[in-house]
Image (cartoon, rainbow, N blue to C red):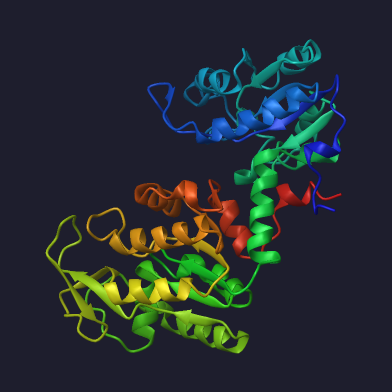
Amino acid sequence: MASFRTIDDLDLKGRRAVLRADLNVPTKDGVVTDATRVARAADTIKALLAKGAAVMVLSHFGRPKGKVVPEMSLKPVLPALEKAVGRPVTFVATDWTDGKALDAAKQAAAGSVLLFENTRFHAGDEGNDPEFARQLASLGDVFVNDAFSAAHRAHASTTGIADHLPAAAGLTMAAEIEALEKALSKPERPVMAIVGGAKVSTKIDLLSNLVAKVDMLVIGGGMANTFLAANGHGIGKSLCEYDKLDTAREIEAAAQKAGCEIVLPVDVIVAKAFEAKAPHRICGLDDVEDDEMILDIGPNTETALEGRLNEVKTVVWNGPFGAFELEPFDAGTNAVARTVARDTKAGHMLSVAGGGDTVAALNKAGVTQDFSFVSTAGGAFLEWLEGKALPGVEALRP
């Protein structure tokens, strides 16, 4: 049995489904510029409609902090949602105190889709106010949460409603939980975690949890410099948290105790300036000059990682290897991403990646579609990897 309920567990014929989607999408001049999340929400909406429901769509948009902020209205998302769903969607303008939401919901016929105004226009959403949760629950007969990206927040629209209605995961939420459970809770071994990014300090919980769960932990990005410095290597003027050298050593000791191998770069690409196309060179770990900074992994590291990837069955990736936003310092991230994508496509491994920079890096490398699962959830993905219970997921447990 699944560890959470899905829409297959709900009787939806002739009922109103309150769907918490994540439509917090980027817009420019009132037009949606990236409709990925809209498309994912539309898949769940279509599945609910196919089961005979009327769908009441809720979402937050930006951070209006409990006030009506016209620039943060969900109305500009309406055309993109209608296009993705393939039918008209009714927008319900409400400040959540005027009774308009309930009036509209009561009149909704089976097969209709209603998009309600930003739930965060009411302070009770982020405050998880029981009265506001009850008000949202009154819009329907069942609750479907499809916003994994907001699952680490205990808000009225993500967890509070589940106290009042039968609750289940939407298609996006279910796919995300299943991918993460397969990668970390019940993985096929050996498991490799790739963790990059700038700072050790922001990922201490993540690294500490992963060393107890994976067989191999590859550390890249700026945080690798802190580990290299902790191991006595000179890193010039590279980004480094010198106040976290002991933390790095503690993580290495915990990894050794848990039987997890930590993999660090064996060679690096250095430059004297942090800018695209800056003059650069490949060098060994003990050859970095005082006026140079490490901006990417070197070719020997790429080759070594390719070899290690041949040994593993599961890869979990969070964070790029180098300054991937600057060419040519995206080469290391691109090379490893393409190897993971190739091995996944060939059926040799399960690959799960997530986090804003990671998704951007995989998009840049052109391999997103070849990974087993790429999470669009930033904070929720990280907290899951840190081993924390997510309120939005816990609310869906039977």
Q: Position of residue 71 (x, y in %)?
A: 47, 23
Q: Choose between 19 and 14: the one closer to the eye.
A: 14
Q: Residue furthest front?
A: 346
Residue in the image at 84% along x and 22% along y: 15
- The quarter holding residue 121 reads top right
Residue in the image at 72% along x and 38% along y: 156
Residue in the image at 47% along x and 67% along y: 195
Q: Choose between 93 and 53: the one closer to the eye.
A: 53
Q: Is residue 108 left or right of residue 343?
A: right
- The quarter holding residue 312 reads bottom right
Q: Position of residue 292 (x, y in %)?
A: 18, 73
- For the image shown, how many numbered marks are present on the structure? 0
Q: Position of residue 17 (x, y in %)?
A: 78, 27
Q: Is residue 229 left or right of residue 159?
A: left
Residue in the image at 40% along x and 78% along y: 264
For residue 214, above or below residue 158: below
Q: Is residue 59 visible?
A: no
Q: Is residue 205 left or right of residue 226?
A: right
Q: Is residue 17 left or right of residue 286?
A: right
Q: Position of residue 276 (x, y in %)?
A: 18, 55
- The quarter holding residue 5 reads top right
Q: Is residue 286 visible?
A: yes
